[in-house]
Amino acid sequence: MVMNTSMIQRISSLLHKDFTSIKGEPHNPTVILNHFNFTIETINRTNMMAHYCPNKYKIYLNQEKTPQTQRMILAHCLGHYILGHKYPDNFPEENAKTLLLGDYREIEANIFAHNFVMPEKEVRQYVRELKDVEEQARIFGVSQKIMIKRFKDLGFYLNI
């Protein structure tokens, strides 16, 4: 089932609410993945960012990526899990089909990741408090490039 953006935002918001009361770390995808018994293993493969194995509850994460990028990758994988996306557990080169960036599951997981790590309500609140891109990137633990994309997605004009 293809979901619209507002439905994905609502799911992300509910997850935040649940985990704020349970764990106190609503923006940390690792804490939530661990709660769902996922194992995260690092790999050194330059041709991929990560590989999500839902049936094995395992994520292989590229160790060469920055901590900020790894955070977004893990939030993306969490999105796949929460949104019920089904994938085979074998690595892509072992699989006859390659996943394309235009696949609706990838788009939905990206929307989820951005809403999960950088919730619209909090981003807007920080903008009202005059916190700039650099400061918000630090607060949310993401790169400035990702924070700029989030600002633009939310309709903020940036004079860069």
Image (spheres, rainbow, N blue to C red):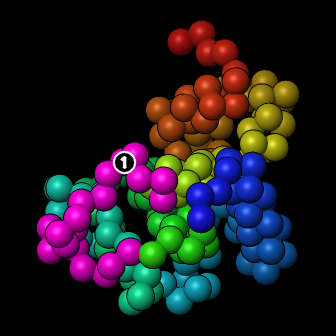
Question: Mark 1 — residue?
Answer: 101
Question: What's the residue at 68%, 48% (across, down)?
Answer: 5
Name the spot of residue 81 as percent of width and height, x first: 54, 74
Image coordinates of residue 70 in percent, x first then y, are 41, 58
Q: Is residue 97 left or right of residue 112?
A: left
- The span shown in magenta is 87-105
In the rendered view, would you say 95 is above or below 160?
below
* Res. 153 visible in picture: yes
Whether residue 16 appears in this view of the structure is: no
The residue under the point 43% across, 81% down is: 54
**In percent of the image, x 71 and y 61: which residue is there?**
12
Q: Nearer the viewer, residue 18 or 83?
A: 83
Location of residue 65 (image quadrant): bottom left
Is the stretch drawn in magenta largely helix, strand or loop?
loop
Whether residue 104 appears in magenta in the rendering, the answer is yes
Image height of 135 relative to 16, above or below: above
Marker count (numbered):
1
